[in-house]
Image (tube, rainbow, N blue to C red):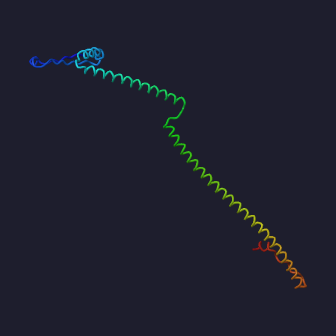
Amino acid sequence: MLRVDAPMPEKAAQDSLVLRVEISAEHADAIAPRVREALSAGASDGSLTRRELAVAEHEARLREEQAELEKRARLLTEREAELSLTGEPTASERIRFAHRRQEIELTAQDLDVREQDLRTREAEFEADVMLREERIERWRGELKHLKSELERRERDLAEYVDQLQDTLSPGPRLPSPPGIAELRRTA
């Protein structure tokens, strides 16, 4: 689209001609080389030429930067593909793994402490059971000894009673006294 604005005729004598041109984006690329030529030919002091060179240098730098960005993007894509194929963890995954490993080690240490405590308690319990069994066996032995002592005394007492009856009464004998076992049954 091309539009030209010119000043009003009564001012034409006083003002110079001002020409304003609007160009659509589609047509700008088509006329860009001609505009450059016209500007470089019409510039008497060289400022336009310097500006054109600066713009050209800037465009060259932009192209180089664009090429560098494309190269980095390609390398990044290749690296991502490598990582997905090799299964190698990323930095964030390695950090997560390190934290998890630390938690597992702490848990393992806690379990080791608990296991040691449990083994100590189990050993104490077994020792206590063994001491009780030994005490019970000792008591059984003492009871057997006391029982045999009691039976011996019962026999001695029965013999003594028999001897007393023989010496005290020349007549018929009294029945023998009951033993401890018989006394226990009647009580």
> In this view, which residue lies farthest toward the right?
170
Q: Quadrant of the N terminus?
A: top left
> In this view, which residue lies farthest toward the front?
45
| Figure check: 33 above or below 101 | above
Near-viewer residue (57 or 133)? 57
Horizontally, residue 164 falls left or right of residue 95, namely right
Horizontally, residue 67 falls left or right of residue 180, namely left
Residue 41 on image: x %, y % = 25, 15
Residue 45 on image: x %, y % = 23, 20
Look at 65% across and 54% down and name the residue there: 119
Look at 41% across and 23% down and name the residue there: 67
Horizontally, residue 15 falls left or right of residue 176, namely left
> In this view, which residue lies farthest toward the left?
10
Residue 32 on image: x %, y % = 29, 16
Q: How many marks?
A: 0
Residue 89 on image: x %, y % = 52, 35
Near-viewer residue (62 or 70)? 62
Q: Quadrant of the C terminus?
A: bottom right
Q: Quadrant of residue 15?
A: top left
Q: Quadrant of residue 40?
A: top left
